[in-house]
Amino acid sequence: MDALPHMTVDIEASQQQIALSFQQASNLMQTMEDQSHSNISGNTNDKGPSGFQVMNTQQVSQAIQFVGQNHLSQGWNGLCIQGGQIIQQQPQQFAIVHTNAAGQLTCVPLIQSLPISTIAQSQQEQSVMPQVILTSGNYMQSLSGTQVLIPTPQGLAVQQLLTLPMTSPMVSFQNGQLVSAQASPVQPPLGSLIYSTQPQALCQETQQEQPIETNQLMPSNNDGSTMCSTQGNSSSNVTHNNLKVENPDIIASTVASVTPIFSTFTPEMVQEVQDQPTINEISREGNTHIVDGVDLKEIKEFAKEFKMKRLAMGLTQTQVGLALSATAGPAYSQSAICRFEKLDITPKSAQKIKPVLEKWMKEAEESYQLGRPPNGVHIHSPEHTKKRKKRTSFSNQAVEYLNEYFKKKTHPTGTEISGIAHQLGYDREVIRIWFCNKRQALKNAVRLTNKIQAPRSGNPSGTIPIAPALPDVSISTVNAS
DNA sequence: GGTATGCAAATAAGG
DNA sequence: CCCTTATTTGCATAC
């Protein structure tokens, strides 16, 4: 079984099977809760005090059946689906949601402490759209894009959890307390939670957010074609991130931007999640010999020698870079040469570049001796070695477009990628890679915060550390296959 | 104007 | 062919 099984849920079909009574549903949930405990890391500190569910995909269909029934009067909110897991909230209307070190999600009930008026008001609002308060940084990023199935009078709605800038007026964080828009303090739930006293705001999914039409986010779309398959047409069914939804009108495609507000990642933090140290870093640690079969000493000596000779010939890094790209063999930019000389490069990379520079330097010296300009200007010899593809620079407009698209759909289909490429005027492959990289960036960011917020030193008794905001990405982590 | 560096595009490798 | 993950490397720009 895949680690992250592809999850396609046919809600329509599931709805037809809905037959659970509330009691049955409760029993089911209890069962699932029992089962889920084994999925949760043994560190109880990582679990929210409320208890919560981490369900495997085998439980999905049952859960869908369950959530298809409108149990909101009992306080059941619905399900959050993320990356092959379903997280069912406990019977509370409000919850703080966050991930633990293992990347699992916890839901912390707030209902006990919310002002009655707030709850009542919320419950009165049409079909009681569940309200999930997302804290900043890791929490919201982890959940951002998570899809929540919401029972409504019209059937099930799917709402992607997205986050608002921390300046959101809906909920703020004052003096260590959650404060709603009505300025009613919301006590941290269940006492055992300890909040950072940093003035972090919370982010809240907006209730009843109007669906934002695709074309609002795009450059003019003069051919009338629909770029986002999840939007815009009037067919009765649309597929939205693998979830088939009855009524496309109630798909809430929130696109609130998540702007990085806190950039609290120090280089040390980042270093923690980096894998390959540079030669410099290795040396600093005291290891100066052979790493990964690479003789660091030899590399260092060559780097020094290379620089010396380069300067002796009066050549700049830029010139060498240009020369390399003009001659056969791999090309390296000024940046690469700079990094090589500084040993700000991994041993493996250094090992790869070294022969290229060696060869070039040898020829350059010969030319120099003959009083000729260094090679690189002459003959574009048949390039047997394929050069790296030139790096694409996307226009701001293109990046904006891509980001907006990504918020709606992190895994566009091949056809959609082609459409985007055509629309923006870039190679299809370039667009495809962009999405790959974007997904990767998001995952890395989440990992980074998880690592930072749950360091080895431990995370005392239920503390929910406040993570910094992450880069401007929102995602649904439904796996493509 | 040369060098250093952050971010992210491109590549490699394994499914 | 496409995905993910790890890594390399270049563009853009700061120093």
Image (cartoon, coloured by chain):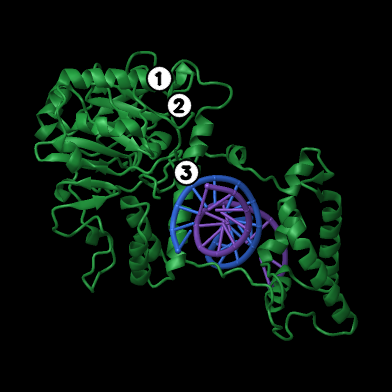
Chain colours: A green, B purple, C blue
Q: Nearer the viewer, mark 3 or mark 2?
A: 3
Which element is circle 2 on?
A: loop
The chain letter for the residue carrying disc 1 is A
Q: Residue at x 73, y 53 (%)?
A: A348
Looking at the picture, which amino acid does disc 3 mark? Lys
Q: Quadrant of residue A352?
A: bottom right
Residue A63 in the image: x percent, y percent? 25, 30
Residue A21 in the image: x percent, y percent? 14, 22
Q: For this view, does A324 lie left or right of residue A448?
A: right
Mark 2–mark 1 Cα distance, whole angstroms, equals 22 Å
Question: Going by the picture, which residue comes out furthest to the top?
Answer: A191
Residue A181 in the image: x percent, y percent? 22, 31
Figure check: A150 above or below A193: below
- Are marks 1 and 3 in one subunit? yes
Disc 2 target residue:
A465
Give me the disc on residue A162.
none
Q: Nearer the viewer, mark 1 or mark 3?
A: 1
Q: For this view, does A373 lie left or right of residue A184?
A: right
Q: For this view, does A103 lie left or right of residue A215?
A: right
Give me the disc on residue A443.
3
Figure check: A42 above or below A130: above
Q: Earlier in the sequence, mark 1 or mark 3?
A: 1
Mark 1–mark 3 Cα distance, whole angstroms, equals 25 Å
Disc 1 target residue:
A37
Q: Nearer the viewer, mark 2 or mark 1?
A: 1
Mark 3, residues whose alpha carbon is within 10 Å: few (<14), some, or many (≥20)? some
Residue A375 appears in view: yes
The chain letter for the residue carrying disc 3 is A
Nearer to the camera, A462 or A2: A2
